[in-house]
Image (spheres, helix red, strand yellow):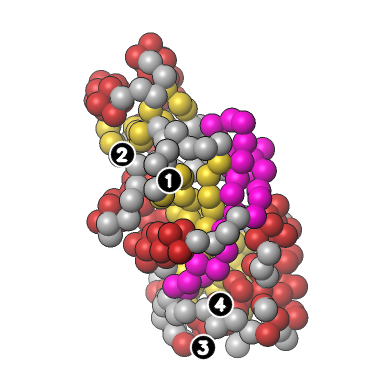
Amino acid sequence: MRFGLLYSLIRKEEKLLLKAAADRGVDVVKIDVGALTYGLRGATRLPPVDVVLDRTLSHSQALYALRFFASYGITTVNTPEVVARCGDKALTSIALQEAGVPTPTTLVAFTPEQALEAIEEIGYPAVLKPVTGSWARLLAKVSDRQQAESIIEHKATLGSYQHSIFYIQEYIEKPGRDLRALVIGDQCVGVIARTSDHWITNTQRGGTPTQIELTPQIKQIAQAAAAAVGGGVLGIDLMERPDGSLTCHEVNHNLEFAKSLEVYGIDVPGLIVDYVIASANRWPGVSGVPTVVPSPHSR
């Protein structure tokens, strides 16, 4: 089997994945996403591969590269369709709602006037997010009308694609943490809590990962959220409402797990590599979503 690792930067996560593949006797071809030219019938300098694991930092580069690979008959993890949904918060919200997965009240507006009206419809405080982006960047908790007008004016003045679509969600009074569940294939294999004194609890923003029990409730909603966007290797972000119920606010298609690896208590890179191998073996030439079959190295 020819296993391709699509990357833009070799970080700790990629090194761990390469080691997991080596432990299984799998040779991995490292493919720099920016070193290829993508044509309709093939990509220049693309080595022959049966399956590609996407570890690209740029959502747009990953989306186009994976779509080209799929057109060449190469299995991809994740699929371009999944990357498209997860890389756009509005599309994720629609997919979750259509699948009946609990998700925060969400409104989208295209003008500053409608954005202000949407914020007031949801009520203060509300959360204003860009539709694309990661690491909890450019999030704003809007506490009153004056603040809303100011933030909307700044976004409208910036004028970029990120800021021209106003994505507004209700603010959830979570208990100082959110949950990150890891789904591989159709199984939720682990969960951590990310705790912070700040309302943003992402580990990239200083949140502390801690191990918690993988309850049936967490497992059920995480697996349902993963299925809603198309499945694969996914990080499901959940929040606990004051009544103890869970709501899914985001699905991540490119996991960063190095900071939380020991907290998960499972072999995350090994499970991911096992899933990629299973994808190539079960779905040759098709961007499919098989169930992961862990090897002894993952136990």
Hey, what amino acid is under mark 2? Answer: Thr
Dot in front, 4 or 2: 2
Residue 291 located left or right of residue 2: left
Q: How many other residues sit within 10 Å of disc 3, few (<14), some (14-19) or many (≥20)?
A: some
Residue 202 lies in the magenta-colored region: yes
Q: Which residues are magenta?
A: 184-211
Q: How many other residues sit within 10 Å of disc 2, few (<14), some (14-19) or many (≥20)?
A: many
Q: CA distance from mark 3 to mark 1?
A: 41 Å
Residue 219 located left or right of residue 206: left
Q: CA distance from mark 1 to mark 2?
A: 20 Å
Dot in front, 4 or 1: 1
Q: Residue furthest front?
A: 243
Reading the image, the residue beneath label 1 is 244
Reading the image, the residue beneath label 2 is 106
Whether the residues at callouts 1 and 2 have beta carbons within 8 Å, the answer is: no
Labelled disc at residue 281: 3
What is the x, y in percent for residue 121?
A: 25, 26
Residue 68 located left or right of residue 257: left
Hey, what amino acid is under mark 3? Answer: Asn
Q: CA distance from mark 4 to mark 1?
A: 35 Å
First along the sequence among labels 3 and 2: 2
Residue 136 located left or right of residue 27: left
**Residue 220 visible in rendering:** yes
Q: Secondary structure at mark 4?
A: helix
What is the x, y in percent for residue 104?
A: 35, 42
First along the sequence among labels 4 and 2: 2
Relative to 167, say whether 13 is above or below: below
First along the sequence among labels 3 and 1: 1
Q: How many other residues sit within 10 Å of disc 1, few (<14), some (14-19) or many (≥20)?
A: few
Q: How many other residues sit within 10 Å of disc 4, few (<14), some (14-19) or many (≥20)?
A: many
Reading the image, the residue beneath label 4 is 276
Q: Quadrant of residue 25?
A: bottom right
